Structure formats: structure tokens, C-alpha cells
Image (cartoon, rainbow, N blue to C red):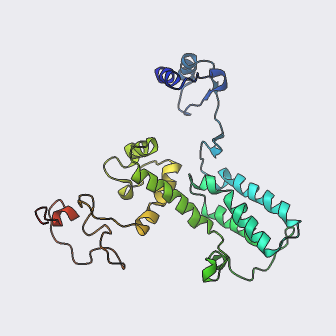
Amino acid sequence: MEILRIYESASGQKINTEKSSIFFSPNTSQERKDEIVSILGPMNDLRHAKYLGLPSIIGRSKKQIFAEIREKVGKKLAGWKGKLLSMGGKEILIKAVAQAIPSYTMSCFLLPMSLCEDLERDLRSFWWGQKQQESKVAWVGWKKMCKPKSLGGLGFRNLHAFNLALLAKQVWRIFTNPSSLAARILKAKYFPYEDILNAGLGSSPSFTWRSIFQSIEVIKNGTRWRVGNGRLIHIWEDKWLPTPSTFKVISPPRDFGDYPMVSSLIDQDTK
């Protein structure tokens, strides 16, 4: 209640308990529930299915939780199938509308691979002229169509790769803005003694962290260090050399004691 009071004082907004709800762990006794509700006010014991357009609780069946995305895409495709569209028109609709629908969810959660494949199957069928549920021959593989036009493709998105790219942006935000609230919460829980690029999955991770964790490798593969004082750069494990092949030191590791960082190679007296 003190936290709510401070929030109300700082923001000028008063909490409307009649429009607020609270949900408890299944292990919470009814006595404790009644006690908490009596303190907080007339709140309902209710679990909201969604918060800001995203599922608030992720169960075991991820595909079922995110099935609504496929339904939305399917409705769009169904509305377009009855129209006479050129191949150029279909391309624009797929890129600008159909493949954009899951973007918001993809920026927070890693969609199941099977769901991405189902979405791509629906888009492929629409592209090749499916009207109802009849099967159509796909004359070119979808992977080739996802290549850039300069390489002979059409530039469609590989949904799984695009999903990882969006989550990698979250990793980069956490890495470059460690003072943000999200970064501080995730660091305290999952990587308290290191940066996010060296974080582990941890025990009983949330689905949000599990999703972000899967994209860390994208950042590792696409970035390298710029040497400053060298205190955070590991000599052999990190990419910091200007050599384009590996950007890593390929010579056998030498003993630098407990501090094998690039800073140990820098002579501070040399100008």
C-alpha cells in the first residue's frame, strides 16, 4: 500500500481498486487471499489473459497460446483470396501486412518453430494462388523466396530468423542501457555477476528470459569489441582483432594468471 501511495503521489494518478484485479499463486491459502484483498481494497481475484496485447501467463502449450496470431493472418489472407491481385500486389500485402502482424509479439517472445512454419505455409499457399483449401504446387522453395532480390529471391521474411533478430534488439538494449528498469531486473535475477552476453539460462527461467536468451548468440556472432582500456575484453574468447576471418586471437593461450584481459597486454607508459 505504501508503494501504491508513493506512485499516486508521484504520478498524480489514483488507483481505482474497483477496476483493478489481483491474482495469486495456486499455493496461496484462501485465508491469505482474503487477508490481502481486505488490505488492498475491493479487487477481484482474476487472471487477465492479456496485458498490453500480449499473453500475461505462458502455459506449457506455446503454440496454443500464440494461435491467435495465425488466426489473424488467416483472416487477412481469406479476405485477399477472393480479389484479383497481381503478383506485385500479393508481394506488397504479404510483406507490409501479413508478415507484420506477429512483429509486436515477436519482439517479446520466441514463437514456436512449428507456428512459424504454419504461418509460412499459409503465406506460400496464398502466393501460389490458393483460393479455398485446395493444394497448389510451389514452383520455388520458400527459403529461396526469402533471399534478397539481389540473390534471386523476393525478400520475404524468414519468420524464425526475424523473430531472433527482434529479440536480439532487446539483448542489445539491455547491454547498452544497463541502467534501465528491465535490464536491472533481468540482471539481478539471471546474470548478477556478468554481462548479458555471458549470461546463462538459469534455473526455472521465465518464458520472456528464455526467449531473449535464445537470441544472445545472434549478437555474439554479429559484433566485435572496439578496444579502449581492454578491461572487459577477454584475450582469447572475445572478438577484438581487425582480422576479418575470426576477429579472435588464434595463437595458443598463454598464462596471464587470473586476469587474461586485453588490458594486461597494454603498456600504460607507452605513448
Q: Is residue 71 above or below residue 41?
A: below
Apparent side of residue 261 relative to residue 151 in the rendered image (left or right): left
Q: Give the quadrant of residue 76.
A: bottom right
Q: Position of residue 42 (x, y in %)?
A: 63, 19
Q: Position of residue 1 (x, y in %)?
A: 50, 20
Q: Is residue 195 visible?
A: yes
Residue 260 or residue 46, whichever sits in front: 260
Apparent side of residue 254 relative to residue 246 in the rendered image (left or right): left
Residue at coordinates 71% horizontally, 82% vertically from top-left?
140
Q: Quadrant of the C terminus?
A: bottom left
Q: Is residue 84 above or below residue 76?
A: below
Q: Give the quadrant of residue 70.
A: bottom right
Residue lying at the far left of the rendered structure = 269
Q: Is residue 261 visible?
A: no
Residue at coordinates 70% horizontally, 66% vertically from top-left?
95
Q: Is residue 135 above or below residue 41?
A: below
Residue at coordinates 52% horizontally, 49% vertically from top-left?
208
Apparent side of residue 6 relative to residue 225 in the rendered image (left or right): right
Q: Position of residue 164 (x, y in %)?
A: 53, 62
Q: Give the quadrant of residue 229.
A: bottom left
Q: Is residue 177 above or below residue 85?
A: above
Residue 156 or residue 115, whichever sits in front: 156
Residue at coordinates 17% horizontally, 65% vertically from top-left?
266
